[in-house]
Image: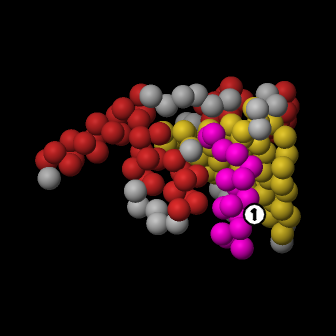
Amino acid sequence: MLMKNYFIAMSLILGSLTMQGQSPAVSAIVDAYRHAPEVETVSVGGVVLNMVSWFIEEPTAKMIIKKTRKVRIMTAPDRRLFHPDDMTAFMDDIFSEGYEKILQIREDGNIQNIYARMDNYRIRNVLIFVDEADQFVLLGIKCNLKYDDLVELLNEAI
């Protein structure tokens, strides 16, 4: 039991030390609001994600997790907590970094946007915005996916 706890503690420490950074725009917005009241941020790196994959039974979902290097999440109860100029600059920055909008879903006043940054036919970064009446979520994912990986995941979900 002691060895198991030691392994988990070391994995968490090494995982946080070896995390590679995401885009400068994501880092900037998260760093700017990290200590703001009512804003929560979480970053999870490779070793921890690998451990999470041990508990996933679906083969495609497990493969997606294994190809994910870092996940960064920022949540707030309302988008209005973020200064409009900061959000405009953030959107300008992600487009200048090569992100493209790949999907937008509008339903009952809620909006979900998905952006991706590609390199040599691989998806390297994904940004997901969830803007609802009672919650705003920014999910940044650093990964190494092919379009076929996402198609396979979507086919399983449908």
Which residue is found at the position 13% from the left and 47% from the top? 2
The answer to whether residue 55 shows anywhere in this view is yes
Which residue is found at the position 83% from the left and 54% from the top? 103
Q: Amino acid at mark 1?
A: Ala
The percent coordinates of residue 67 (x first, y second) are 56, 44
Please state if 112 lies on the left or on the right of 46 as rendered.
right
For residue 155, above or below residue 146: below
Please state if 115 lies on the left or on the right of 137 as rendered.
right
Looking at this view, is 145 or 23 the one in front?
145
The residue indicated by pointer 1 is: 133
Helix, strand or loop under label 1: loop
The answer to whether residue 136 shows anywhere in this view is no
Looking at this view, is 8 or 155 the one in front?
155
Which residue is found at the position 84% from the left and 69% from the top? 107
Based on the picture, tell me whether residue 148 belongs to the magenta stretch.
yes
Q: Start and end of the magenta stretch?
A: 143-158
Please state if 150 lies on the left or on the right of 73 as rendered.
right
The percent coordinates of residue 27 (x first, y second) are 64, 30
Based on the picture, tell me whether residue 112 belongs to the magenta stretch.
no
Image-quadrant location for residue 7: top left
Looking at this view, is 154 or 71 the one in front?
154
The percent coordinates of residue 29 (x first, y second) are 68, 33
